[in-house]
Amino acid sequence: MIAARIRSTRAGSAEQFGQAVVELALVLPVLLLLTLAVLGIDRVTQAHMAARAIAWEAARAAALASSANGAAAQGAAEGMAVAEDYHLQRSALHVTVDASQFRRGGQVSAAVRYDVSLADLPLLGRATVRVGSDHTEPVDPYRSGLRGDAS
């Protein structure tokens, strides 16, 4: 009687182990896909936050420039410096600074576009996601040495 009970307990645990392996085999691919999706979303979110920071810094640097001629160059240079701090690939980054309204009381704008590569994540192939941000910064209407009205 005791031997029969031991045999039935061993057979039951082997069946439970087999069932656990099957369940794991069914759930593991779903968990793997969810993990990859979270990694991809994280990468895109970080790139979008970086693009916002770059646009803000580029527009602010351009608004603080000493002349209209140097505003666009100074803004773009600051944007690239910030992008380097975020470890973004320069080849996938486009920073455009519009200083056409650079004067007292005017404004400068910066636009940033970045192509996030997801190619190193399995199952996505050569997928890229474009993120971007725009920022407009006012030029101080009380700055001296700049042309233009404060209207």
Image (spheres, helix red, strand yellow):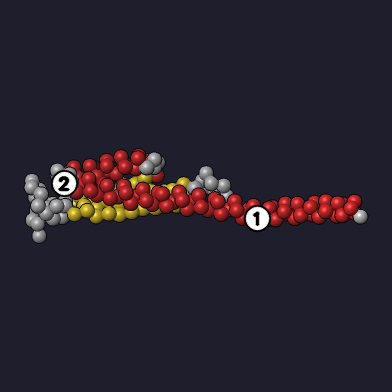
Q: What residue type is labelled 1?
A: Val
Identify the secondary structure beneath mark 1. Answer: helix
**In the displayed structure, does residue 56 sit left or right of residue 39?**
left
- At 56% across and 54% down in the image, what residue appears? 34
- In this view of the protein, which residue sits in the foreground, 34 or 97? 34
Q: Name the residue under label 1.
A: 27
Residue 13 horizontal/vertical position (percent): 79, 52
Task: Provide the residue designation for mark 2.
Answer: 68
Residue at 19%, 48% in the rendered image:
63
Kindly identify the residue that appears in the image at 51 percent across and 46 percent down.
119
Q: How far apart are marks 2 and 1 (CA)?
A: 60 Å
Q: Which residue is drawn at 35% across and 49% down?
A: 51
Position of residue 73 in the picture relative to residue 30 (left or right): left
Under tag 2, what secondary structure?
helix
Q: Residues within 10 Å of mark 2 (few under 14, many from 20)?
A: some
Identify the amino acid type marked 2. Answer: Ala
Question: Is residue 97 something that shows in the picture?
Answer: no
Rendered location of residue 66, percent (x, y): 14, 43
Which residue occupies the foreground of this view, 8 or 140?
8
Q: In this view, does 50 lie to the left or right of 70?
A: right
Q: Nearer the viewer, mark 2 or mark 1?
A: 1
Towards the viewer: 85 or 19: 19
